[in-house]
Image (tube, grey):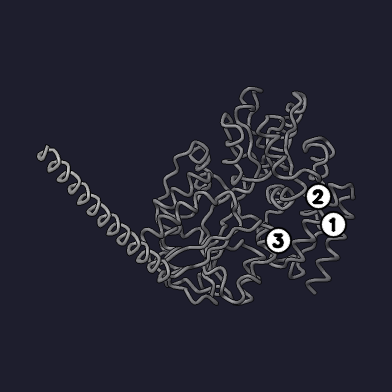
Amino acid sequence: MKKMVSWSAGLFSFILLLTACADDTSQQNQEEDENQGSESSAAEEDATQISFIHWRGEDEEVFDDIIDQFEEEHPDITVQMNIYPSEQYQSNAQQMLRDGSTGDVFTSFPGTQFETINNAGFFTDLSDEEFVNNFADTSLEVGQSGGSQLALPYQLVFNMPVYNKGMFEELGLDVPTSWSEYQEMAETLKENDITPIAFPGADIGPNQTMNSMMMNNAKDEDVFAKLESGEETLTNEWWTKTLEDFQYFNDNGYFQEDALGTNQDSAMQMVADEKAAMLATGSYHMASLQDLNPELELGFLPPITVPEDEVEYEGIHTATFMLAVNDNSEKKEEAKTFIEFLSQPDIASQYANETGQHLTVNDVEYESDALQNTSHWIDEKDTRFQPRYLITEASVEDAVLGSIENVLGGTDPEEAAEEAQQIVEENTN
C-alpha cells in the first residue's frame, strides 16, 4: 500500500513538473511570437510605402502577385496600388499627382494626357536610368519630350478589330485585302445571321475604330499635327471619306443595331456568343474574350476601306500604359526600383501571359496561343502608330470623336465634319 501511495505521489509530482514546463514553454513561445510580431511590425513601419496608380482593373490580380514578389525582394519598400476607371483616370490623374502624395509611380496614356502631364511638369526625367535599356528602342519615342525619356511604354497594343478565326474557317472566308473583298466578307456574315462587327459605340468604339478606319484614307502620319496648326482641315477628303465609311458600315448592317448604345462588355459578349464575328476594340480584349469563350481562336482584322493597290498600312499599333515617376514625389528612388522590377524579363513575361498583352520589354517570352498567334504583327506587318494619340489638344480630340458619334446618330458626314472643324478652329486659333 505504501508503495502504491509513493508511486502515485511520484506520478503526481511528475505531472506537475510537466505542466510547469509546458506553461514555461508556452509562455516562452508566446513571448517569442510577440517579439517576432513586434519585429515584423517594426520592419513594416520602417519600410517606405510608395503609391502606384493606373487604370487597368483587369490586371489587379497579376499586379497583386507581382507586388508580393517585389516586396519580398525589397522588404524595405511596400507598394499601395490604386486602380481607377480609365475615363476617370484620364480626367483626374493630373490633380492626383499634384501634391506628390499619390502616384509615386503612375501610368500615362500617350497623346493628350502625356502632353497635359508634361506641361504640368509632373514627369521625372528617366533618361539616365539603366532600366531604360530593358525596353525596346523602337517603342521609347512616344514617352520622350525635349530629348528626355519621361515615360516608358509597357504595353504594345494593337488597336484594331479582333476576329473569330474559327468562324471564318467554317464559312470559308479569307481575310480581305481590299475594300471589295471586305464588303463580300461582311455580306457573307450577314447572310449567316452574324453581325460582322460588334461596335461599342457607347464608350470606346469611336476612339479605337477611328484609327484603322482612317489609316489608309489619311496616309500622312502628321495629319493631326497639321490639323492643329491650321495646315489641314476636317472638311478635306481624308476625314470626310472616313466619316462616310463609318456611315456605310452603320447603315449597311456591318455594326449591330443601336451601336451607339452598346458598351464594351455587351460587344464582347456578342463575340463570345458568336453572334458577331469581330470586336471593334483591340488586342487588350483578347484575354477577356477567351475567358468568356475558351474555344475562340482569335486574330486581327482591321477594316480595309481602299482598293488593294492603295493599301499602305495593314494595321495599328500603340505603345501605351506608360510607366513614370512623379516629379513631386519624395520617394523617387523607391519608385524607380519598382519600375526596374517591372521591366525584368521574367516579371514582364508573367504580366504578358496572365493579361494577354504584348509588351515593349526585351526578351519577353509569350506562352499563350493568342499572343504567339499574333506576335508576328510586331515585326512582319506594316502598322502605323495610333493616329488618335498624335492629337495633342483635348478639344481637338473631342471634336474628331464627336463627328463620328454624330454620323452614327444620323448626321450627314460633310455636315458633321464642318461642325467639328469649327470647334477645332475655335480652340487652336
- Count of labels shown? 3
Between the C-alphas of marks 3 and 2, the distance is 16 Å
Q: Position of residue 259 (x, y in %)?
A: 80, 42
Q: Which residue sits at x=44%, y=70%?
A: 48
Q: Which residue sits at x=83%, y=58%?
A: 235
Q: Earlier in the sequence, mark 3 or mark 2?
A: 3
| Residue of label 2 | 243
Query: Are the residues at dot 2 and dot 1 in contact (C-beta closer than 8 Å)?
Result: yes
Q: Is residue 139 above or below residue 407?
A: below
Question: Residue 132 lies in what quarter of the image?
Answer: bottom left
Residue nearer the viewer, 98 or 158: 98
Q: Earlier in the sequence, mark 2 or mark 1?
A: 2
Assign a secondary structure to mark 1: helix
Badge 1: few (under 14), some or many (20 or more) residues near its Cα, within 10 Å?
many
Identity, as a three-letter code, of the amino acid under mark 2:
Leu
Q: Position of residue 282 (x, y in %)?
A: 63, 45
The circle drawn on residue 223 is 3
Badge 3: few (under 14), some or many (20 or more) residues near its Cα, within 10 Å?
some
Q: Which residue sits at x=13%, y=38%?
A: 4
Between the C-alphas of marks 2 and 1, the distance is 8 Å
Q: Position of residue 386 (x, y in %)?
A: 64, 55
Assign a secondary structure to mark 2: helix
| Residue of label 1 | 417
Q: Residue furthest left?
A: 3
Identity, as a three-letter code, of the amino acid under mark 1:
Ala
Badge 2: few (under 14), some or many (20 or more) residues near its Cα, within 10 Å?
many
Q: Which residue sits at x=77%, y=61%?
A: 398
Assign a secondary structure to mark 3: helix
